[in-house]
Every structure is written in C-alpha cells, then in structure tokens.
Image (cartoon, rainbow, N blue to C red):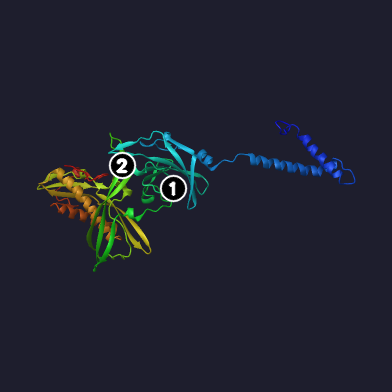
Amino acid sequence: MRNGRYTENPNNKQSKYTQIILLMKNYLNSHFKSPLNVKSLKPFFYIALFLITLSGCETEHINQPTQTIEQSLEQAFSLDDFKDSPALQKEDILIDWTSAVERKFDTSIFYEFSVTHKNASIVNIEGYVSKSSYRLLARFDENDQPEYFLVELLPSVDNTTKELSYIAIADYSGMAYVFDTTGEKIARESYEVGVLQTKSIGNGIGRNLLPRQPAKCAILEGLEPVNCSGGGGCSTSTVTIQHWEYFYDVSYYTNTNQVIDITYSHRESRGQTVKQVTNCHTSYTPPVNNTTAESVKSNPPQVLSDNPEEWPFPDCSSFEYAAVGGSRVAAVKGVRNYFVTTHADGNDLKIELSDIVIPGVVYFNTPLVMTNGEAQTATALLVNEAITATALWYDANPTASANQLEFEFLNEINLAMKSIGGAASRNNLYGISARSVSQYRRNFFTTGNCN
C-alpha cells in the first residue's frame, strides 16, 4: 500500500495466479460435495489466465497514445524540394501546427495552418502598404497520402487588419497565389468580398484544388447586350459599356524593377457609354439574346501576374519610330492580346478565352509632323482603343474563330491609326530591315508616355 493505493509487486505474478486458483477452489468446494484439488482446476486456470491476458492487452491498447491528424501531417511535411524565389525562401517559413482549421470541400477535407514568414518585408508604394499573409493547406489524396499547398494572400488595403483564411474566404478582397511544395505557382486568383472573380491556372492540379468558379461579372466586366438584329449574315448590337478603373499595390525591387507582390486595392466607376456595333460575316449566326453577359475590358484582372506578357496595356516603347520618306514608321513583332467572351450553350453560359498573336511584323506609320515620342505615345493609346473595340466585336461574335478574331484585331488597329492620319498593316511598304523590328511590350500600369 503506497499513499492509500495498492502497489503490486511486478515479480509476484505467479503468486497472483495461485491466489486466483485457491480462491476458485474454496468457492467451488463450498458449492460441491466432493473436495477439488488444484489439478482439477487446470481448465478454469487457463480460462482465467486468458481473460487476464486479454484484459491486460486491452488496457495497454487504451493507454497507448494515438497520433492526431495534425501530428501525422507535421511528421510527413517537408520543404526539401522547395525552390526559393526572391520573395520567398523556405528557411523563412514557420508553420504553427497547433492552429489547424478543418473544412470539407466535395470529397476532400482540407486542413489549414497559419504560417509566419520570418523576413517578410512591407514595401510602401505611393501611400499604400503591400502586406502578404501565408497559409499552409493540407489534405489526403485517394491513396491516403498527405499533400500540401502554400497559399499567399495579398489583401486589399481595407482587408489587411482582418483575420485571413483561404478555406473560409468569407468577405476577403484581394489576390491569392497557390504554390505546391516545390515552389511552383499553380494558381492565381482574385476575390471581391469573398467571391472568386478570376482564376488563372499554371498547373492542372490548381484547377481542381477547391471547387470555386469565377464570377462572370469580373471575367467580363460591364458589357450588357440590349438589342440584336440584322440580316444577310450581319448583326447589330447596342451595348452599354461600364468603365472601371482598377487600383493595385505593387512591391518591387527598386534597382531592377522586378515585381515581388501585386495586391489588389479597389476599383472605381468611370461612368458608362452606349455604342452600336455592326458586324457582317457570311458564316455568322446572331446569338439568341436571352441572356445577360457582363464584359468589356479586354484584359480582365486574371492577367495580373509577374509575367510581362500578361500585363494589361500596350507600352509606348514598343513602337520605335523613325522618319522614312514622308512618314514616321515603326515595325513591331509579337503584337498580341487575351480576349474573353461568353455565349449561351444550351442552358449554360460558356466562356471563351483566346490568346491572339498577330503573326509576323505589323508596320505602323504616322504623319511626319509628329515627333517620334508623340507617335509612340499616340500609337500605344490607339492600340489600346483597338483592343477595346475588338473585345466588343468578340462579344457580339462569341463563336468567331481565332483567325477571324486575329483579322478583326488588326483591322481595328488600322482603323484606330487612321484617326491620326496613319495606318497599320502587315505589308512592308517602306522596306524596313529585320534589324529595325522591335518587340511588342506591355505595361502593368498604363500605355506610358514616350514624349
């Protein structure tokens, strides 16, 4: 007896079994006429021994600590294959394994953990603060093996003080970048008040990670078909264009201008305009106008990334003009744009995304009275107008082929250039040499000012 509790001598197991048998013998002798000896109790002894052993095994099993899901996820986690980037190094990632939040999506249960980024820098740009927050996502695949994803949340300014969560996005506004454990960016997403606006996929798994579908009002922003009529292969649409200006906070290295983070801030309305758009194609069938589609900025927010080819505006530095004969001429290769539209497909609304690259070289010319800088600045603005006009045409012709869209894009550029007495064509009418051809460049903020 120790502190009021019985303490068994571990070396006295044999005496324990003997005591049990003697107790059984006394009990049976008191109930039977003929006395029993220990030998006759062997069957009872083995039964008792079995029950004692079974009870001991069960007690041992109950007392054995069980590993939690969080502990198993922590034990299996590794960043050995993570490739560091200028903005994120694996040695800076600290995971709070006690902060798990659980939520089920379709057939997968996701576990989200808070992540501390030890050396995260906060960069001030024009009065705004760019601040990112990280989360670790984990789930078990069909083979019951854990897989992990790192999410970088780039909140808008009014979201920076809120508790952020990727699996409970609620009223979040801003960007979300999803990485796998190698550091590859597999998805870019933008949100407004908890609603997924746009999504860009870098790797197949990003498409099915969470079952969130982008809202059509942000993939296509502001174009509402009102009336559609015409005949002989022609269609006329009256469209109301809602004009929006988007604001973003950008952190970058001042010595190289390399973009680190892009944080969505807000958007502001710039009014609306009404325009008639008429298009004629022999193979064109006017769409049934019983749905409302919103659209029209040719470069929706999904293009916001660290890839310059996906930035929204043509940059004036693309057009390197020189005086040739009685005009100023620029030769540019790689003129391209992403166009998005929707159309009714039965009871569904189908989204079409086309990456249009005008093949070869586009030759631009302006009047000689303009300086090179004036011609560059004006051309970038006019190409941007042509992008908007082509986007309108694509909305009126959502089933157009890529070749038709490419033809329309170049045609709209030429029409825009004519407004200043210039032109655009794929014909080299001025004998421009190949070494004078410049590369089409894009700008994240504006078309630029090359004056």
Q: Secondary structure at mark 1?
A: loop
Q: Residue at x 53, y 41 (%)?
A: 72
Of pointers 2 and 1, the one earlier in the residue sequence? 1
- Residue 432 visible in the displayed image: no
Depth order, front residue of 182/63: 63
Residue 74: x and y, percent? 51, 39
- On screen, residue 266 above or below 223: above
Mark 1 Cα shell of 10 Å, populated few (<14), some (14-19), many (≥20): few
Dot 2 amino acid type? Asp
Report the residue that reaches farthest toward the front. 4
- CA distance separating discs 2 and 1: 24 Å
Residue 118: x and y, percent? 41, 34
- Residue 109 visible in the displayed image: yes
Image disc number at residue 249: 2
Mark 2 Cα shell of 10 Å, populated few (<14), some (14-19), many (≥20): many
Residue 359: x and y, percent? 25, 51
Report the residue that reaches farthest toward the bottom. 231
Q: Is residue 252 left or right of residue 5?
A: left
Residue 174: x and y, percent? 35, 46
Q: Secondary structure at mark 2?
A: strand
Q: Exactly how many numbered labels are in the figure?
A: 2
Dot 1 amino acid type? Ala
Report the residue that reaches farthest toward the right. 34
The residue at which mark 1 appears reads as 168
Depth order, front residue of 432/177: 177
